[in-house]
Amino acid sequence: MPQGQYWIQGNSSVKTLGDTKNYYTGRVFNEYGQRNNFRAAAYQRLDVGVQFHKAKNGHERIWEISLYNATNHQNPFFYYFDATNTSTVAGAKKTVNTLKQVTLFPALPSVSYNFKF
C-alpha cells in the first residue's frame, strides 16, 4: 500500500511525458515505503458440515448439509482507495483517500444429494 501521494505540476520534466499545461495535471504519484510494510486484517473462517448415509437394497444415499463461513467473519478479499473531494470552494480540489475493504462470501449454506448404485 502506498504511504503517501503527491501531484506533479506541469514543468519541463512532465512536458516530456506529453503535457503542455501549466497547472496541476492530475498526475498522481504514489510513494511506497519498504516492501511488506502493510498487513491485511486477519483471515478466519469456520466451515461446518454433516452427512447422513442410508444404505438400502444395495444402493446408498448421502445427504450433506454444510455451512461455509459459519461465523460470518468479514474477511478481506482486496483493498482499494476511495478518493473523495472534500473541498467547500467551487472549482478547488482537496482530495481525501480512504482505504476500503471488499469482502466476499458471508455465511453460505449448501445442500447436496448423492446416490450410489
Image: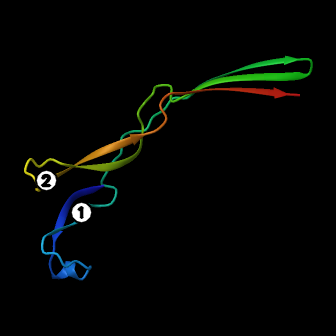
Q: Residues within 10 Å of mark 1 (few under 14, many from 20)?
A: few
Compared to residue 60, the image places residue 6 above or below, namely below
Asked if residue 100 lies left or right of residue 103, the reply is left
Say which amino acid is labelled 2.
Lys
Q: Identify the residue at horizontal 45%, vertical 34% (top origin).
A: 44
Closer mark to the observer between disc 1 and disc 2: 2
Q: In this figure, what is the number of numbered marks? A: 2
| Lower position in the chain sequence, tag 1 or tag 2 | 1
Asked if residue 74 lies left or right of residue 48, the reply is left
Residue designated by label 1: 31
Compared to residue 81, the image places residue 115 above or below, namely above
Disc number at residue 94? 2
Q: Nearer the viewer, residue 99 or 36?
A: 99
Residue 102 at what x, y percent from top left? 39, 42
Q: Residues within 10 Å of mark 2 (few under 14, many from 20)?
A: few
Q: Is disc 1 placed on a helix, strand or loop? A: strand
Q: Is disc 2 placed on a helix, strand or loop? A: loop
Which quadrant of the view contains residue 16? Answer: bottom left
Residue 56 at what x, y percent from top left? 88, 16
Residue 74 at what x, y percent from top left? 41, 33
Q: CA distance from mark 1 to mark 2?
A: 18 Å
Compared to residue 98, the image places residue 62 above or below, namely above
Say which amino acid is labelled 1.
Glu
Quarter of the image with the N terminus is: bottom left
Disc number at residue 56? none
Quarter of the image with the C terminus is: top right
